[in-house]
Amino acid sequence: MREQHLRPSPISATVDFEANGTQHGFLRLPYSRDDSAWGSVMIPVTVIKNGEGPTALLTGGNHGDEYEGPVALFDLARTLDAKEVQGRVIIVPAMNYPAFLGGARTSPIDKGNLNRSFPGRPDGTVTEKIADYFQRVLLPLADVVLDFHSGGKTLDFLPFCAAHILADKVQEAKAFDYVKAFGAPWSMKMLEIDAVGMYDTAAEEMGKIFITTELGGGGSATAKSVGIAKRGVRNVLTHAGIINGDVDTSPTEWLDMPDGDCFAFAEETGLVEFLADLGDVVQRGSVIARVYPTGRTGAEPIEVHARMDGIFIARHYPGLIKAGDCCAVLAVRV
């Protein structure tokens, strides 16, 4: 394994990360396939650098069906002037580019979930090679990392910016300062239920300041959710001292996900009816959803109960649900 990670990445950048100015290019990953024997996956990247200063690594499309981040970052890549910058901004609007083009959470090439593939492998699948490049090339360049997420095609969220509880309390405090600066309507102390192989963890273990978002979902984006993303990313750059100006502060309400009782899972497959909407306050034991068997009429629905008092922050999307799917997520006010 150690020898494996000494191998060079097969990905080459068409931009120079050390050069001043604005560069638009690609991370080129060779990929031989039926329709192109010497083909490549061409992941768009922008580098904007001006002198010395901190580096922000801004990413979207970690999951390919989440759109607020890509919209905000494609827009930022064309509008941010190098004269505004003191330091460096690296923008990758669609990290898992094959998944992004396929409109799917995972890659259509290898079914790889990029956000469960770190640290990756230089001789692995396409998704593992992308993870390896971020692990060994891009993350070491960064001081602060903002990775945009939303609910994709299977979840819908209250719009929030988040960071994780960390063992290093200095690192944790800095991350939550960035969450506050981002200025989403809600700010979250986030709990992950499946953290193995995550980009988040890779960055945090390197000591980087890492923040993320969940900005809606349903496999699309709204004017409101994109507006939150666009304003938030500039706030992050301002807070880092990379661009001048004042943080565009907006009221935010702080939430916490204290333990696994935040999550409610479907135990049957069927048609889901929600009895509460996002933002509602629910009580422990209350019925937050019913799952109707769809094989015949007249069957009683299975109830999904809240396992804690809290605010309804995320729900399954769309209307059909499978046993084992996350049905609802709750959080508590800080």
Image (cartoon, rainbow, N blue to C red):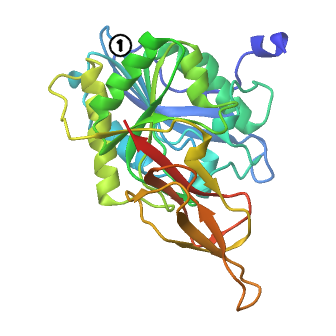
Q: Nearer the viewer, residue 274 or 141?
A: 274
- Res 62 → quadrant: top right
Q: Residue furthest top?
A: 52
Corner quadrant of residue 270: bottom right
Residue at 30% in and 43% down: 230
53 with respect to 27 (left or right): left
- Rendered view: 125 above or below 202: below
Mark 1 — residue? Answer: 54
> Pointer 1: residues within 10 angstroms few (<14), some, or many (20+)?
some
Q: Nearer the viewer, residue 88 or 68?
A: 68
Q: Position of residue 108 (x, y in %)?
A: 71, 53
Relative to residue 249, is residue 64 depicted above or below?
Answer: below
Question: How many marks overall?
Answer: 1
Q: Quadrant of residue 43?
A: top right
* Quadrant of the rendering where the C terminus is positioned: top left
Vertical placement of residue 303 versus 41, above or below: below
Viewer-nearest residue: 305 or 77: 305
Q: Residue furthest left?
A: 245
Is 120 left, or right, of 99 in this rendering? right
Q: Tell me if I can see residue 22 in this picture.
A: yes
What residue is drawn where x is 27% and y is 19%? 242
**Element under disc 1:** loop
- Residue 289 is left or right of residue 30, and the answer is left
Inspect the image, locate mark 1, and give the three-letter code of the amino acid beneath it.
Pro
- The image shows residue 271 at horizontal and vertical percentages of 64, 76
Which x, y percent locates residue 76? 32, 39
For this rendering, which residue is in front, 143 or 167? Answer: 167
Name the image quarter holding the N terminus. top right
Residue 30 seen in the current view: no
Residue 126 in the image: state x and y as whole percent: 73, 37
